[in-house]
Amino acid sequence: MNRRTFYAEMAGGKKLDYELYLHTEALLACQKPFDQFCNKDELLFQIVHQVEELWMKSIAYTLLDIDEYLEQQQAFRVLTLFERCNRTLRLMIDQLELLETMSPKEYQEIRLQLGNGSGQESPGFRVLLKIIPNVWPTFERVYLTGRNCTVEKIYDSGYAHDDAYTVAEAMLSFDELFQKFRLHHIYLIQRSIGMGAASLKGRSVDLLQAGAKQRFFPALWDIRAAMTDRWGGSYGRVRDSIGSQAETEGAGGAGEPGGPPGS
Ligand code: HEM
C-alpha cells in the first residue's frame, strides 16, 4: 500500500459538517507528523495520553455538576453522573493496557523524546486532584450535618439503603476506581521501564506507590473496619469454628444465636 496516500487521508481536513463540528482537522493534527515519529509505537503513545487527558477533562467537568446536584440533594442525578465518571475511569484503566503492547526497547526510544515531562504535569490529573477533595465537604454538609446523620448511621445503626447510602457507595466506587487507575498505571510502568528506576524528573518511581494508596473519602473506607470490629466484638479477634459450635450445640449446650452488636 502507498503509505503517503493514506497518511494524507488520515489527516482529514475536508470541510464536511462532521469534521467542522468535531474539529477533526485540529484534532488529527495534535499528533506528530508521521515522518517525525521516532518509531511505529509513538503514535499510539501520544494518542493514549491524549485520549486519557480528554477523559480526565470530562470527569472533572462532571464532578462540578455532581457537586451542585449534591448541594440540591438530587440523588438520582448524582448517581447517574457518578456512574458516568466511574465508567469513564474503567475505560481509562483499560486503555492503559494498550501501551503494554510496546516493547521495553521501543518505549526507551520514545522516552528519549519526552524531555523531563512527567505524568504529574498532566493538566487533567492535576485538576482532578484539586476538585475531588471538594466533593466530601459538600456531601458532609448536606447529607450528614444537614440531616443530623453520620456515616455510622448510614451504614449500620440507621441503615436504610436510602439516598445517602447509595450516594456514599457511588463516591466509594469512584475512590476505588481512581486508586485502581493508579495501580494499573504502576503495572504499566513495571512492564515498560521497571519499578526502582528513576523518573524523568530523577525521582524514584516507587514514590507512585504512596499515591496509589491515597483515599479521597477515608470515612467511607473506615466505617467498614469499624463495623467489622464492632460486629466482631461478640466473638473477639478469633472466632470459634462452625464445626466446634455444632458439636457444643449437639451436646445440648447451644448458646445464644449470633446477632448484631447489642442484640
Ligand atoms: C509506558 C507508559 C508510561 C510510563 C512508563 C509512565 C511513567 C510514569 C512515571 C515514571 C511517573 C512518575 C513521574 C514523576 O515522578 O515525576 C508517572 C506519573 C504519572 N503518569 Fe505515567 N507513565 C506511562 C503512561 C501514562 C499514561 C497513558 C497516563 C495517562 C494519563 C499516565 C499518567 C500519569 C499520571 C497521572 C502520573 C502521576 C501519578 C501520581 O502522581 O500518582 N501515564 N508516569
Image (cartoon, grey):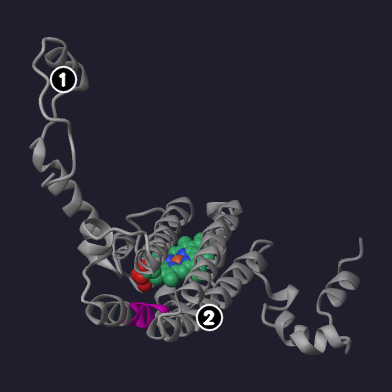
| Rendering coords of residue 26 (x, y %) | 73, 87
Q: How many marks?
A: 2
- Residue at 43% across, 76% down: 125
Q: Is mark 1 within 8 Å of ligand 1?
A: no
Mark 2 element type: helix
13 or 193, nearer to the observer? 13
Q: Quadrant of residue 75?
A: bottom left
Segment tinted magenta in the rendering: 128-135
**Within the image, what quadrant is residue 64 found in?**
bottom left
Q: Amino acid at mark 2?
A: Lys
Q: Quadrant of residue 23?
A: bottom right
Q: As rendered, which of 72 and 251 lies closer to the eye? A: 251
Placement of 243 over or under 10, stated as above or below: above
In the rendered image, which quarter contains the C terminus? top left
How far is the residue under mark 1 from the one under mark 2? Answer: 56 Å
Q: Position of residue 108 (x, y in %)?
A: 52, 61
Q: Which residue lies under the disc numbered 1?
A: 245
What residue is disc 2 on? 57
What's the amino acid at mark 1?
A: Gln
Mark 2 crowd level (few <14, some 14–19, many ≥20, 10 Å Cα): some
Percent across and percent down for residue 124 are 48, 79
Mark nearer the N terminus (1 vs 2): 2
x%, y% of residue 86?
A: 50, 65
